[in-house]
DNA sequence: AGGTATGTTAATTG
DNA sequence: GCAATTAACATACC
């Protein structure tokens, strides 16, 4: 699931369910997802605090803490390929939960993760975290000028550059394919040969695809039939030209495209 | 049984 | 030394 649209939806979900509630306790199923953070620190910083705001950069979610101290920091969550959030009013507890956060009124927020690829950390400041981890600008707020620098700074295939989190944060395998399909650009095209017009098109399609996907709550079944995400099957009909969707491997990732309409 | 999967990253290659 | 590609990671699912 979690690429930019998924994480943005999770951000909105956390914002709608979990802000300004006093945390009475938390529990961690294992320490394996912790990133430079001890289990004791998670418990200590969460207890008695509340989430003041939910921010996102690329695929990273930051739940900023509000506590009595001056520098409460934030809970950072990365969802890997199978992470999610679930808020429960009653005592239901979802499967695969890794972090459980209980609020004063008995409701809980659960971070779940089936495949244990992801990360949980207590950090001081999201901006510092983003800078220290070398993340590129967020794909949804990047300017066309900066995107031009990102693309023309890459040497390989345009898809690889768009997916490189240190160059541009937020796009993953599924949505990069979708964006390039909408832009009618072959994902294998070298960055160096893309024109300024093509960069402008990619910029517009990043915004279009991501915002529509967020509106669909990142659920493919709620996205238009005309989208590639609905046809990620080798040999499926291209919704635009009726040609065949094909599956290739690019930079080690499974890539779907239509050679009939992507150049 | 084996291949595949939205993630990152260490190791390897260019 | 840098950037790009590959292999490995952990687990569920078909």
Image (cartoon, coloured by chain):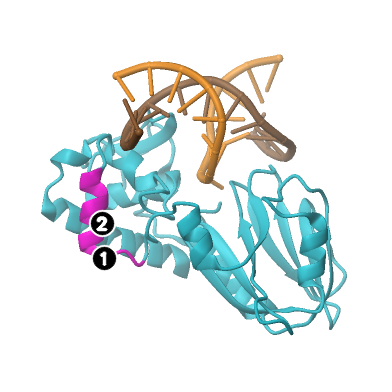
Chain colours: A cyan, B orange, C brown
Q: Provide the chain ID for the residue under circle 2.
A: A
Q: How far apart are marks 2 and 1 (CA)?
A: 6 Å
Is there CB contact under 8 Å for labels 2 and 1?
yes
Residue drawn at 72 percent across, 55 percent down: A37
Residue drawn at 67 percent across, 50 percent down: A35
Residue drawn at 31 percent across, 64 percent down: A142
What secondary structure is marked by label 2? helix
Compared with A98, A70 (above or below) is below
Residue A145: in magenta span: yes
Q: Which disc number belongs to residue A83?
A: none
Residue A89 location in percent, x, y? 80, 76
Q: Provide the chain ID for the residue under circle 1.
A: A
**Count of all numbered marks drawn on residues in the image:** 2
Image position of A115 (left or right of A240): right
Task: Give the residue pinned by disc 1.
Answer: A143
Task: Give the residue pinned by disc 2.
Answer: A147
Q: Quadrant of residue A72?
A: bottom right
Q: For the residue carrying disc 2, how many other residues have a C-alpha within 10 Å: few (<14), some (14-19), or many (20+)?
A: many
Per the rendered image, the range of residues in magenta is A141-153
Q: Residue A173 or A125: which is nearer the viewer? A: A125
Residue A167 location in percent, x, y? 35, 49
Residue drawn at 25 percent across, 59 percent down: A146
What secondary structure is marked by label 1? loop
Residue A61: in magenta span: no
Compared with C10, A139 (above or below) is below
Image position of A122 (left or right of A129): right
Q: Is the magenta stretch mostly helix, strand or loop?
A: helix
């Amino acid at each position: 699931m979690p690429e930019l649209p998924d994480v943005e939806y999770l951000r909105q979900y956390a914002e709608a369910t979990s802000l300004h509630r006093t945390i009475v306790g938390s529990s961690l199923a294992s320490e394996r997802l912790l990133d430079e953070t001890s289990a004791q620190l998670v418990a200590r910083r969460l207890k008695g605090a509340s989430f003041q705001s939910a921010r996102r950069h690329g695929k990273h979610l930051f739940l900023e803490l509000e506590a009595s101290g001056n520098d409460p920091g934030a809970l950072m969550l990365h969802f890997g390929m199978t992470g999610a959030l679930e808020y429960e009013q009653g005592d239901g507890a979802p499967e695969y939960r890794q972090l459980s956060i209980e609020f004063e009124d008995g409701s809980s927020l659960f971070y779940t993760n089936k495949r244990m690829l992801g990360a949980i950390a207590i950090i001081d400041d999201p901006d510092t975290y983003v800078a220290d981890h070398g993340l590129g600008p967020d794909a949804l707020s990047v300017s066309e000028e900066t995107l031009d620098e990102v693309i023309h700074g890459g040497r390989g295939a345009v898809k690889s550059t768009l997916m490189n989190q240190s160059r541009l944060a937020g796009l993953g395998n599924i949505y990069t394919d979708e964006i390039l399909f909408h832009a009618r650009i072959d994902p294998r095209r070298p960055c160096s040969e893309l024109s300024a017009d093509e960069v402008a098109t990619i910029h517009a399609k990043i915004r279009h695809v991501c915002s529509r996907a967020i509106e669909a709550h990142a659920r493919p079944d709620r996205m238009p039939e005309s989208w590639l995400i609905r046809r990620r099957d080798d040999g499926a009909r291209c919704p635009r030209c009726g040609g065949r969707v094909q599956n290739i491997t690019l930079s080690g990732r499974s890539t779907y495209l239509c050679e009939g309409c992507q150049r």
